[in-house]
Image (tube, helix red, strand yellow):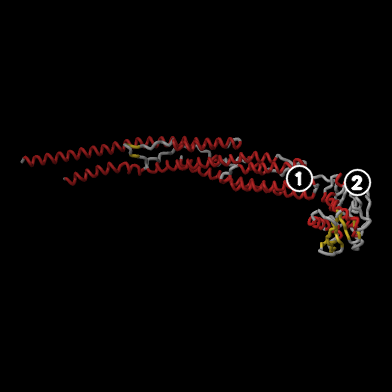
């Protein structure tokens, strides 16, 4: 009997203690079946990219800049012979040189081998340390007449195998050139081409017709004769008595 | 004889006592069960109402994003939504207890915790979205400002790199959020590169070096094209974040169903 009483007591206490836990396990939250109205298309919104910045970036334009205007013209070029021979030249100086000689060498070589220049004769101009077919001088202005009495301190010159570039012109071009707003690089093209043209066998030329590009062998710094400044040889100038081309 | 009688009496008293204990116990169980069921049912109902309301509220706000005009308006809705996500946790029905004993079903408790976690995650993602938008809002006027600058004469050409330097400084002063740092770095480096090219233009203009100027203009166009392309990077970054936000929101909505 005592055992029976114990059994009943233990059962009662155990039941009392275990019921909440058992009930928790069975779960009573499954009746959450509320009708939720959900717009599926709104589940993804491009909220971080409102496109204003991406649009502005995608349409970003290159800053508008005005290119420098120049009265210098480039002639129509149709004559261009394939390179078949090399002309060598060395670079030298006379007098006190304040210009950057390295720049002089680089720019002179670029002009001589430019596709618009004398390379159209089918010639490659190659600088050598000494000698060469001609010598390209950068000369102090006052020293230019020392090459020949026919040369003036005012301009550049050619005497025999010496192609002489006047340092003052190299640095400052000429007044007429500057007055019309010609750039210094174009003047340098013109003066190197003009003096080298003499070495190639060319004399001075005249303006063929007003409004046209001046021949590179015209004395453009002195009188344009109605032509336009032009640093490059015309098609009609692509010949060389010295080279037999 | 008396002893025997006493022993019988005592046994009867024990049996009666046990019977009373049994009845009381069963009564308690029945009362507990009934009462806890009432409480749980009430909790379940409140939870259902809460979930329904929360789900609809979030859905409405998310839907309203579609009509938002501009990032400032979007940001305001996102902030509102983030607040809702945070408030959501505080509005969850209180779990029922009897005499201090929590009687919430275990899975209901787990789901409630999941709702709390997901609402927290949603609020965090929404805050990140706001940061990304705020970053873009700061960048936009700088870009538009520098875009308007031109170099139509020498004076303007000289002022142009200064304007770009000022824009670069402004961009650098913006603190990018983690997600936009790669874009930010690309922008700064692209703008510095453009400014370096712009630096060269005034001298070329003065020298009337048309060929040199034209070459630099091409370089400038190429660099600006590079800068333009960086909009893809920004679009990728923001789209990735929006998809993550969408995933979190979708999971929260699933938990609220």
Q: Quadrant of residue B149?
A: top right
Report which residue position mark 1 lands on: B202
> Residue visible at 55% across and 45% down?
B243
Circle 2 residues within 10 Å: few <14, some 14–19, many ≥20: few
Please state the chain letter of the residue tagged with numbered disc 2 in the rendered image. A
Please state the chain letter of the residue tagged with numbered disc 1 in the rendered image. B
Question: Quick one: B73 or B11, which is closer to the camera?
Answer: B73
Q: Quadrant of residue B108?
A: top left
Question: Quick one: A172 or B117, which is closer to the camera?
Answer: A172
Kindly tell me whether residue B226 is visible in this rendering.
yes
Question: Quick one: B205 or B118, which is closer to the camera?
Answer: B205
A160 to the left or right of B190:
right
B97 to the left or right of A48:
left
Q: How far separated are the C-alphas under marks 2 and 1?
A: 30 Å
> Residue visible at 23% across and 38% down?
B23
Q: Where does residue A210 sit, x and y in percent of width and height?
A: 92, 46
Q: Where does residue B221 sit, x and y in percent of width and height?
A: 72, 47
Q: Where does residue B55 sit, x and y in percent of width and height?
A: 48, 37
Question: Could you tell me if the residues under marks 2 and 1 are in contact, i.e. CB atoms within 8 Å?
Answer: no
Report which residue position mark 2 lands on: A211
Question: Quick one: B238 or A196, which is closer to the camera?
Answer: A196
Q: Where does residue B34 sit, x and y in percent of width and height?
A: 31, 36
Q: Which mark is residue A91?
A: none
Circle 1 residues within 10 Å: few <14, some 14–19, many ≥20: many
In the image, residue B207 sits, relative to residue B96, either above or below, namely below
B196 to the left or right of B135:
right
In the image, residue A118 sits, relative to residue B73, either above or below, namely below
């Amino acid at each position: 009997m005592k055992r029976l009483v114990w059994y009943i007591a233990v059962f009662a206490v155990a039941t009392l203690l275990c019921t909440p836990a058992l009930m928790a396990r069975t779960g009573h939250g499954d009746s959450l079946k509320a009708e939720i109205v959900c717009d599926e298309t709104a589940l993804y919104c491009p909220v971080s990219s409102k496109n204003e910045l991406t649009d502005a970036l995608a349409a970003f334009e290159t800053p508008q800049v005005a290119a420098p205007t120049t009265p210098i013209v480039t002639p129509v070029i149709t004559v261009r012979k394939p390179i078949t021979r090399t002309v060598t030249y060395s670079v030298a100086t006379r007098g006190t040189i304040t210009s950057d000689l390295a720049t002089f060498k680089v720019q002179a070589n670029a002009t001589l081998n430019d596709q618009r220049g004398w390379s159209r004769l089918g010639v490659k101009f190659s600088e050598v340390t000494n000698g060469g077919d001609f010598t390209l001088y950068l000369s102090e202005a006052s020293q230019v007449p020392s090459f020949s009495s026919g040369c003036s301190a005012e301009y550049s010159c050619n005497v025999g195998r010496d192609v002489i570039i006047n340092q003052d012109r190299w640095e400052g071009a000429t007044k007429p050139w500057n007055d019309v707003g010609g750039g210094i690089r174009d003047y340098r093209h013109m003066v190197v081409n003009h003096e080298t043209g003499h070495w190639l066998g060319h004399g001075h030329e005249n303006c063929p017709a007003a409004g046209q590009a001046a021949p590179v062998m015209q004395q453009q710094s002195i009188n344009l004769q109605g032509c336009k400044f032009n640093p490059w040889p015309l098609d009609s100038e692509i010949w060389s008595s010295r080279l037999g081309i | 004889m008396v002893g025997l009688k006493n022993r019988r009496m005592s046994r009867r008293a024990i049996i009666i006592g046990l019977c009373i204990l049994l009845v009381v116990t069963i009564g308690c169980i029945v009362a507990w069960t009934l009462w806890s069921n009432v409480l749980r049912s009430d909790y379940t109902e409140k939870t259902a109402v809460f979930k329904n309301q929360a789900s609809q509220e979030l859905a409405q706000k998310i839907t309203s994003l579609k009509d938002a005009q501009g990032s400032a308006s979007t940001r305001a809705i996102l902030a509102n939504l983030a607040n809702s996500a945070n408030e959501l946790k505080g509005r969850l029905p209180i779990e029922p207890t009897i005499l201090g004993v929590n009687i919430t079903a275990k899975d209901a408790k787990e789901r409630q915790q999941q709702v709390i976690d997901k609402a927290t995650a949603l609020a965090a993602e929404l805050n990140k979205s706001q940061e990304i938008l705020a970053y873009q809002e700061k960048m936009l006027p700088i870009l538009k400002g520098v875009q308007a600058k031109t170099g139509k004469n020498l004076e303007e050409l000289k002022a142009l790199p200064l304007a770009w330097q000022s824009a670069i400084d402004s961009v650098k002063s913006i603190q990018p959020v983690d997600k936009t740092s790669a874009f930010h770095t690309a922008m700064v480096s692209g703008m510095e590169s453009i400014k370096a090219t712009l630096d060269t233009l005034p001298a070329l203009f003065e020298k009337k070096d048309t060929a040199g100027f034209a070459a630099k203009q091409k370089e400038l166009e190429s660099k600006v094209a590079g800068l333009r392309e960086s909009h893809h990077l920004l679009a990728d970054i923001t789209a990735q974040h929006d998809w993550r936000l969408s995933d979190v929101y979708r999971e929260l909505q699933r938990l609220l169903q």
